[in-house]
Image: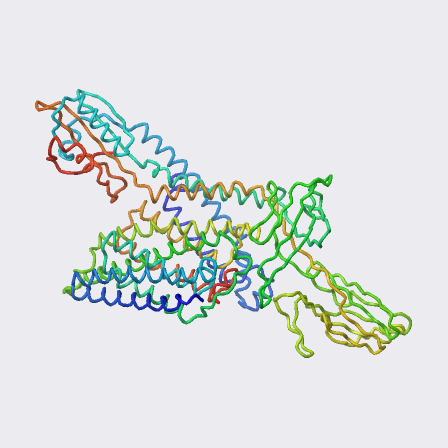
Amino acid sequence: MHPLEGPTFQIAFLIYLISLVLYGVHMSTGSRLTERLALAALASGLAVQTLSLTARGVAAGRAPFSNLYESLAIFAWGTAVCLLVVQLNRRTPAAGVVVLPILLSALGYASTLDARIEPLMPALRSPWMVYHVAAAILAYGAFAVAGGLGLLYILRHSLETKPTPPSWMERLPALDFLDRLIYSTIAFAFPFMVLVLITGAIWAQKAWGTYWQWDPKETWALITTLFYSGYLHARQFTRWRGLPSAWMAVIGFLVVLFTYLGVNLLLGGLHSYATS
Amino acid sequence: MSVLGGARFAVLLMFVWAVLASVGTVLPQGRPPEEYHHLLGRWAHLVVFLGLDDLYTSPGFLGVLAFLCLNLAISSVRRVRRLRREDRGLKVAMSGEDLEGIARTLKLPEGLREASSRVEAALRRLGLSVRRAEADGAVSYYAERGRWRLWGSTWAHLGLLLVFVGALAGNWHGWSYGGYLKLLEGTTQQVTRGRPGTSTGLSLKLHRFVVLGDETGRPLDFSSDLELLDSEGNTLRRQTIRVNSPLEYGATTFYQAGYGLAGFRIQRTDAQGHVRIWRVETDAQGHVEPWSAVLPPQGSSSAFGVQDLIPQARLEGDLVYPVSTLPLAPAVAVFENPDFHRGSQEFHPLGWLVPGRELKASDGSVLSFAGMSVYAGIQYRHDPGYPLVVAGFLLATLGLGMAFYIAHRRIRVVLTESPEGTLCLVAGVPGPPGRDPGDLPSRLLKRLGQDGEPTGEDRHAPA
């Protein structure tokens, strides 16, 4: 392990945690300063975690994508990137409050796992692994953000129906804004999810001579893709908006979580190396 | 047709297909019926009846896929037709009244001809493709960029169709074939198709096979130096293949699939010092059929038989553990029959023979390992659908990129003569409902605005 990796991993975790607290303070006080500090902390956490991942990549001599520890760390990184992009483009501080806990849970879980750098098994020694995992990082990260935004929509929707909504509700984004943001986040992620399937199929063809084996992981990746494809088609052609769309984003992220972690832990298969 | 190619039908099919696919990940697939009876009791009949025991090749599952393909094909054709119809029917010429109240207005000081040249140049500088029409003394422009976006979903759908067609071609009986060769260094085998194997005119020679492991013995890399030959022995290709790096020749691909023990030699040294080598071959699965290998006695000495083989093993005391680490070190369960020459069929266990260990028999002879041969497992597959699948993947990727990452922006401009010069009406055209028409009107006005002020509302023009 590179000497920089461990400390930077912990520092990044701490900075993300500070960012979460600051976003929480902003939500309760409405302070513009705390929102800016939270955004700065998020960007700093991302920079430090990038350093941590780079250090690991240098020490391993390859992209740090091979086991569950590395996968969780890179998933958290991808989620942070997507969250930062959303914050910079659409200024949605409330998203920080719901997405950062997902990111911190991933890093927290990673910290309980064996972080030793292991050499890659022959099947994983392929440039296709980099494309495959990179596409998955962006897709899963954006789906995590979309799921968080879906939660915000449901929260705001339920608060609006109350006779006396709390004052902090006004700091949640408007429903229409959230609805469009959920859609554009999923629309951004979807092509990457399809790329996960395509690169995985090409890789499998190169390694094993078959594109598809109905392995549980690839089957669930297909199910995830079909789910979001259904969402996009329903939205495009049936004008499906609002609460059902938000619920789809939340359920979609649960499907992603099952594909990402549940399959490895419960069903095994060709991707079972990613449980170690 | 409209139902079969409709988006609602597509969503329904995707939902059903996803649910069925998920069942296959929970329910064990391709097991014997008894196992389902043990697992599910009386529900096992229903599972087998519905084909859920072999779900991914069941008629129901493939039927949904067929409908999905049909849906993709119909919706693509309809969309292409619609886009072409819209393109042909696009009305470029508009009058000032058409945009009145929905456009931003700008007064340009120059005459109509000069003003139209300036507007057209400004539109082109914004990276737009421009269509121009003149009618009733007005000059109209319809300008757009990112029109590729409209074709994105069609390309993606056609790409998926191509993938399915390629996969079908690659699995069509008679078009595709495959097999597995176990090659020893220096040997050549024919590449055959079907059963019994008919020659494809190709043969494969293994020059060298190398397995590399790390310090713990975990395999890191294994590679085969292969030569592909035609029916006359001419070299077609020579390449070192490894996992993820196959040898490709036309539609036939040769993969490094594995390696294993092809056979081993046991040396028997009798009490007088006479040496005899006993060769044992493994079967297609890399095992030794119990008692298929028997070393008959010479005179009144013992006979020996092999009952079991562990291709990679570690010996601890008298216990043998199978391992997956290198180096390849087999363990062979050797049995002895001292009364074979008297007609006895009773073999007694003598022990596990591993490299570096000797077994002493009751007749005074000593058994030891005298070497082994390792085969390179080469899987081959002739897949005529491969180019279609790759083309489909490319088309789908491009289509998705176009559909989701290209912004389609449109703008209409109408110029009419006015007493002070030229009146310029500018309006953005929205995309699908809820999609932002973009800031093209503002940017155009900014480019032209040095000669006038926008005075109208920025609303949307008809497409």
Residue B72: image location, x then y, percent: 43, 42
Would residue A217 be found to the left or right of residue B242 on screen? Answer: left
Q: Is residue A119 visible?
A: yes
Q: What's the residue at 35%, 69% (across, down)?
A: A10
Q: Nearer the viewer, residue B262 or A211?
A: B262
Quarter of the rendering containing residue B154: top left
Which of B192/B161 is in front?
B192
Image coordinates of residue B425 in percent, x first then y, are 16, 30
Residue A252 in sight in this render: no
Q: Quadrant of residue B212?
A: bottom right
> Taking B446 as reference, is A82 above or below it?
below
Horizontal side, residue A149 vs residue B359: left or right: left
Q: In front here: A3 or A87? A: A3
Q: Quadrant of the N terminus of chain B?
A: top left
> What is the residue that sits farthest to the left in this orientation?
B419
Where does residue B249 sit, x and y in percent of width and height?
61, 42
Which of the two residues, A83 or B287, is positioned nearer the viewer here?
A83
Q: Is residue B186 above or below residue B391?
A: below
Residue B244 falls left or right of residue A51:
right
